[in-house]
Image (spheres, rainbow, N blue to C red):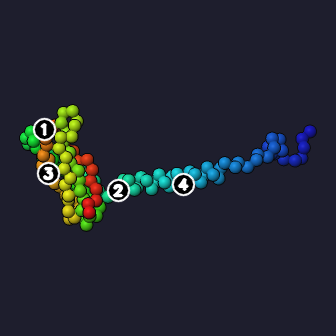
Amino acid sequence: MQSEAPFSYNDRYGVRPPSKWQIPAILCALLGISWLVWAGLHHSNPPYRTTLISFSITSEKEVSIRYSLERRSSETPYACTLVARDIDKNVVGQIDEVIPAGKSKTELITLIPTRGPAVNADVIRCRESD
């Protein structure tokens, strides 16, 4: 004999209690995803970008470095730290070059005086100058 009432899983297994972790988990996921999007967009477009184009050893006491500086604001002067290193990766020459406000993309060639023979040169960092 079958009963006239329709079959219900809730009658058979009981009603599931509501989950208390779903709302905090959704809020945390939304906050985490929005922070991730903001961080990706913020750090993918920095205020400046340097590119080392080339360097050449002109003598035992001097290195020529060619690099470009691309900046968002052309009214901001920048100071870039350039270094020359020897075969043991010790810094043998370092200068701070001030790039005045001007074009947004600038290509520069600079001579770095060294105290010994250098094997490479690099742009360490750039920062806004006063």
Residue 39 position within the rendered picture, expressed as x and y whole percent measured from the top left: 43, 53
Residue 111 visible from this viewpoint: yes
Name the front one of labels 3 and 4. 3
Indicate the amino acid at tag 1: Gly
Mark 4 or 1 closer to N-term? 4
Q: Quadrant of the N terminus?
A: top right
Name the front one of labels 3 and 1. 1
Q: Is residue 123 left or right of residue 25?
A: left
Name the front one of labels 3 and 2. 3
Query: Which residue, as the protein is rendered here, is positioned at the far bottom?
Result: 75
| Alpha carbon separation for disc pair 3 and 1 | 18 Å
Give yes or no for contact between labels 3 and 1 (Cβ–Cβ under 8 Å): no
What residue is pinned by disc 2?
A: 45
| Alpha carbon separation for disc pair 4 and 1 | 53 Å
Q: Is residue 15 left or right of residue 109?
A: right
Give yes or no for contact between labels 3 and 4 (Cβ–Cβ under 8 Å): no
| Alpha carbon separation for disc pair 4 and 2 | 22 Å
| Alpha carbon separation for disc pair 2 and 1 | 38 Å
Label 3 sits on a secondary structure element that is strand
Indicate the amino acid at tag 2: Asn
Label 4 sits on a secondary structure element that is helix
Residue 59 position within the rendered picture, expressed as x and y whole percent measured from the top left: 7, 41
Indicate the amino acid at tag 3: Thr
The circle on residue 31 is 4
What residue is pinned by disc 1?
A: 116
The circle on residue 59 is none
Label 1 sits on a secondary structure element that is loop
Q: Is residue 16 left or right of residue 26?
A: right
Q: Residue at x 83, y 41 (%)?
A: 12
What residue is pinned by disc 3?
A: 110
Residue 83 position within the rendered picture, expressed as x and y whole percent measured from the top left: 20, 45
